Image: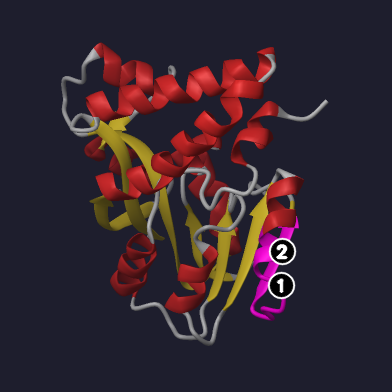
Amino acid sequence: MSDPFYTLYQGLEREGPGEPADVAWAAQVLDLPRDARICDAGCGSGADVPALLAAAPEGHVTAIDNHRPFIDELLVRMLGEPRVMAYKGNMAKLKGPYDLIWSAGAMYFLGVNKGLTVWRPALSKGGAVAFTEPCFFTDTPSEAARVFWEGYETGTAAQIAAHVRAAGFETLATRRVSDAAWESYYTPLEARIAQLRPTADEALTAVLDASTAEIAIWRAVKAETGYLLSVVRPV
């Protein structure tokens, strides 16, 4: 039986919100070396890999994800690119050393404190982490904004920074992932949902319905919540 989640996302460019400008901004904050060693932790099918390669024109990107079909898609996408290595693995057990660990929408699975703690040994001297994390942009988020994250312990920017400090890191800079970056993810997803719905079985229909509801909620609460991109470094 095919995985309905993968059926929905197969072949899409992105599995989460983001845009090349996010990577370029983080690289600028860090004055990233041209030959930087970069890890894309929780890379999905590799939407951010081209931007990471552009940020370090003489560098190398190691991409890791726990879902083999996404790695297979990435390898096809990057066929013939010697500066990319991709493999299925546990992003909590990175080897390194890396000058930058980039993680878009995947720190979610580890938690900020744990993620930074287990990644610290994989950083080079002076290395940094750039990650996106669910964030409330208000101290009084609505119930709908809370529902959007399905019970995840979402915090404000100040609370995320506190988790960073607790892990022994400092926050160098932050910025919100833009509405345009969210729409660049959701617009193609909506088209795929419409394409699949007429022939979807019960399991796939449930996934399509959940994704449709997610999109609608985000558009209603996007002023209150979204992703915060943080660039952090060990103290």
In the drawing, does residue 124 fall left or right of residue 80? left
* Residue at figure coordinates x 59%, y 15% from the top left: 206
- Magenta segment: 74-87
The quadrant in which residue 124 appears is bottom right
In the drawing, does residue 50 fall left or right of residue 90? left
Of residues 110 and 193, the one drawn nearer to the viewer in this rendering: 193
| Res. 90 mark | none
* Residue 25, image x, y percentages: 30, 66
The quadrant in which residue 218 appears is top left
Residue 82 colored in magenta in the image: yes
* Residue 5, image x, y percentages: 64, 30
* Residue at figure coordinates x 65%, y 72% from the top left: 84
Q: Which residue is mark 2?
A: 75
Tell me, yes or no, if residue 178 can be seen here.
Answer: no
Tell me, yes or no, if residue 148 can be seen here.
Answer: yes
* Residue at figure coordinates x 58%, y 64% from the top left: 39
- The kind of residue tagged 1 is Leu
Q: Is residue 149 above or below residue 229?
A: above
SS of the residue under disc 2: helix
Q: Which residue is mark 1?
A: 79
On-image quarter of the C terminus: bottom left
Callouts 2 and 1 close, C-beta under 8 Å: yes
- The kind of residue tagged 2 is Leu
* Residue 77, image x, y percentages: 65, 65
Q: CA–CA distance between discs 2 and 1?
A: 6 Å
